[in-house]
Image (cartoon, rainbow, N blue to C red):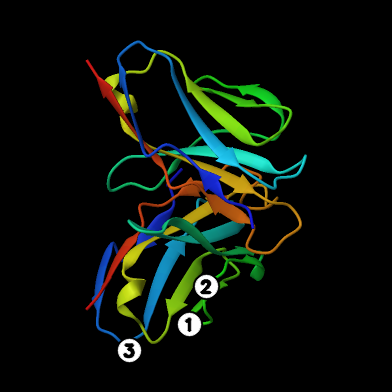
Amino acid sequence: KAGVTQTPRYLIKTRGQQVTLSCSPISGHRSVSWYQQTPGQGLQFLFEYFSETQRNKGNFPGRFSGRQFSNSRSEMNVSTLELGDSALYLCASSSLGQGAGTEKLFFGSGTQLSVL
Amino acid sequence: LAKTTQPISMDSYEGQEVNITCSHNNIATNDYITWYQQFPSQGPRFIIQGYKTKVTNEVASLFIPADRKSSTLSLPRVSLSDTAVYYCLVALKGSQGNLIFGKGTKLSVKP
């Protein structure tokens, strides 16, 4: 089976722009979750989707949003980019749909976003 | 608000057993603890998960004492390929935004 695929791998944007990142989960996985990883803050949970519904959300401003499609693929969007949004954005999928913290997550390699 | 604390780094030699502890407060009886391994330029990889006492799989063991104020990842007989960053993740049931990661422990295994 193919793993979790995230596109693009690298992205450079300027302040004020918006960006959309894409995640394709492992085939058959219906739960997708997103994370931000920075050297300063480490790994932080953004949100989780299951069957096209957001069922959990981390402590991030409303500029961060996401959605999930009927084929389980997911996108996350960041509007009005700030310098501090520069980070590695990771997507993970899981098979059971029990909740991202209570089952095995399969992570993609991430999208490295640089905001200039 | 729950918080997790891990050592920033650890050194070991090939063949030794390594124990990495994650301290966490305010976790309930059924809150899950998961450990992930991450190599440079890759996403984290699942190692082990549990919510009570002891769990063992083919690569590691997880120990959770009765007071649940910490958990310990045990890696038996490490090799050079175990050099990586290890993260603990605490999942708090019943609260939004309930996934709390530790800052990671960089394990260096020497020959």
Quadrant in which residue B109 is drawn: top left
Quadrant in which residue B54 is drawn: top right
**A27 with respect to B85 (left or right):** right
Where A2 sits versus B75, above or below? below
Question: Which residue is depicted at the point 35% across and 52% down?
Answer: A109
Query: Disc 2 designates what residue?
Result: A60
> What chain letter is assigned to the residue under label 2?
A
Residue B79 visible in the shown view: yes
Q: Residues within 10 Å of mark 2 (few under 14, many from 20)?
A: few
Q: Position of residue A5 (x, y in %)?
A: 40, 56
* Residue contact between numbered discs 2 and 1, judged by CB atoms under 8 Å: yes
Q: Nearer the viewer, residue A98 or A114?
A: A114
Quadrant in which residue B84 is drawn: top left
> What chain letter is assigned to the residue under label 1?
A
Query: Disc 1 designates what residue?
Result: A63
Measured in 3D between alpha carbons, the distance from the residue under mark 1 to the one under mark 3, in whole angstroms, is 11 Å
**B51 with respect to B78 (left or right):** right
